[in-house]
Amino acid sequence: MKFISVSILTSLLAFAAGFVLPWWSIAPVAFVVSLLIPQKPVSAFFSAFAGLVFLWGGLATYIDVKNRHLLAGKIADLFFQHPSHFMMIAISALIGGLVAGLAALSAAFLRNKNSVPQPLS
């Protein structure tokens, strides 16, 4: 249940931050959410990853449908010599997911580092 709630919270906050901040604002959002809600590092990574893959995949699909696949098809043709708009949506979602997942993973490691007792010297 925590996995789903963290994914949804990360998606909603990243969506809201996207209105006033640059695209990379998803990293601080995922970092803060993962820092405030304790999870194991693997779970933190995948919850933020899933939240942003669905968010950016959905937004990219919405934009792609609105312009009848013209822009994504032309960019895919430029990069891959094959006009596959689906590939551009998948790559966009993967980039967003990796950025958020790595930020959440960093926060989970930071949280775990602070909770481990240090040996006395």
Image (cartoon, helix red, strand yellow):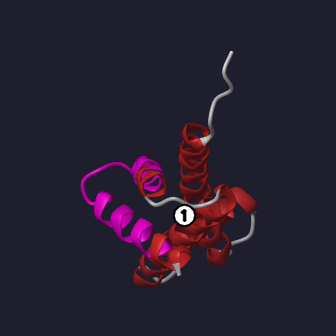
On screen, residue 43 versus residue 17, left or right, reads: right
* Front residue of this view, candidates 55 and 118: 118
Part of the protein shown in magenta: 7-31
Give percent across and percent down for residue 10. Answer: 43, 65
Predominant secondary structure in magenta?
helix
Three-letter residue code for mark 1: Ala
Residue that badge 1 annotates: 48
Q: Residue furthest left?
A: 20
The quadrant of the picture occupied by the C terminus is top right
Q: Does the magenta stretch include residue 94?
A: no
Q: Which image quadrant for residue 115?
A: top right
Q: Which residue is drawn at 66% across and 58% down?
A: 78
Q: Position of residue 92 (x, y in %)?
A: 58, 63
Q: In which quarter of the image is residue 93?
A: bottom right
Q: Is residue 67 above or below residue 33?
A: below
Q: In this view, does 92 lie above or below 87?
A: above
Q: Rate crowding at label 1 as few (under 14), some (14 to 19) or many (20 or more) other CA atoms within 10 Å.
A: many
Q: In this view of the protein, which residue sits in the foreground, 20 or 68? A: 20
Q: Give how far across and how far down residue 105 sits, in percent.
A: 61, 51
23 inside magenta stretch: yes
Depth check: give the residue in front, 52 or 42: 42
